[in-house]
Amino acid sequence: MLRNNNEGLRPPKGDYRHYSSKAYFTHLPNQTQFQQGYLGVQPSKVCGIFHLRYSDDNPLKVEEIELIFKGKVSVKWPQKTEAGTSVTLRGINKFVRLTKQLWSSPTQGNFESITKLDLPFEFGIPEVSPTSIPFIEAELSTVGKINYSIKARIHRKSMIKKSSNKIVELWININRYILLPPIQNYEILPMIKKSEMIECQATLNQTIFDINSGIINVPIKFTLFDMRTIVKKVVIKLKQYTRLKIDNLAKINSNYIARHEVYGNQILVNPDSPNEFLIKMQIDLSKCDRFNGFGRVGYKVGPFGLLRCGCNTHFIDIYHKIKVVINLGKASVSCVNFEKEITIRNLVPPNDDNINFELERRIEGNIQYRAQNQWDYEIDEISGDELPEYLSN
């Protein structure tokens, strides 16, 4: 991002849908984003400044400047008909469109010559607005996205016609947040699976994680009853499910986002019990691949999909599961699986003084946020693309 003189940060050219070097948006001074406030927890708004910069010998003749804040969700995918032909299903919902007059000529119908203009603006974000979901693209032209933009429509004088509109439009990110009060007297309920050869215990002491800094810790303990059994590898994987919806039709895609694996010779033996093994597994969400801006991928850590914030909207649902796989050397049981749905969201920083009042209100109202600790498990691995039960309802 660029900063000119005393202006706020200026988004790069790639974030614009319609770009102009002489008419552009910046953040407010000392801010790094247009959204102010934690949407979903407290009133939130979009704030910034719109600038015009033209030379004295070639000013812009303007009658009016209108600003529009809009949000849209759209999905599409190919679908086979009963006749065997292929059609493209499309769904669009323009869920927010707010308009305001940012500037107008003092004399109605007159075009003023403008060389420099700085116009602060502010829009309240409707409480029900979903979080931004960058471009989702899967096989066979399956596409989904939730995006927001701020658009300036400049009613200017034209050499050819009486007037024309100059458009400057910028894509912006909007994030929803959730607020978690401290959880006291929390009872950890590990998942235990026992067979003739092995007893496994996996623990997940929370199920809600911050997409930006969350760390998923999964301590695993297992006991071998038959010492001839070989533990080849222990793996934890984060899987993301995306469901695109139009009416009663749905298109589901899934992909792995991250994984952590440990081989058998790296697993620690409990010194007090030679047939008991301990391993601490971890996935750091801050190191997962993600979109950085609009269409520009950040850093890569492996051949995985891009992590997206969980959501549940009219056209797009995004869910996540953490999966634990223990690969054994016995041919009779190839692996033991544990599976658990988790929530990945934007969390309000716990030390933010601006939301302490909301935290106290929720605690006084006995609003509890507790992890659901019942794990799902199975013996033998399911196929990677099989739809989990909670998405098939």
Image (tube, rainbow, N blue to C red):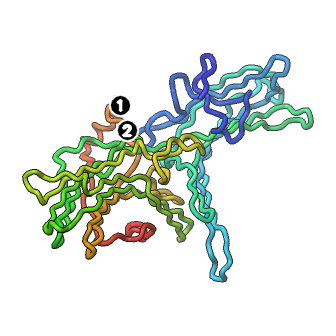
Using residue 275 as the reference point, say whether residue 11 is left or right of it: right
Residue in view at x 61 percent, y 26 percent: 2
| Res 39 → quadrant | top left
The residue nearer to you, when weighing 53 against 98, is: 53
The residue nearer to you, when weighing 157 against 265, is: 265
The residue nearer to you, when weighing 179 against 126, is: 179
Residue in view at x 63 percent, y 20 percent: 4
| Res 354 → quadrant | top left
In the image, residue 299 sits, relative to residue 33, either above or below, namely below
Contact (CB < 8 A) between labels 1 and 2? Answer: yes
Q: Give the amino acid type for the residue marked by disc 2 in the picture.
A: Val
Mark sitting on residue 21: none
| Res 332 → quadrant | bottom left
Q: Is residue 325 visible?
A: yes
Residue in view at x 48 percent, y 49 percent: 128
Q: Is residue 219 visible?
A: no
In the rendering, at what x and y percent does residue 197 appear?
Answer: 17, 70
For label 2, the residue is: 348
**Callout 2: SS:** loop
Mark sitting on residue 352: 1
Mark 1 neighbour density, 10 Å: few (under 14) some (14–19) many (20 or more): few
Q: Give the amino acid type for the residue marked by disc 1 in the picture.
A: Asp
Q: Give the quadrant of the N terminus.
A: top right
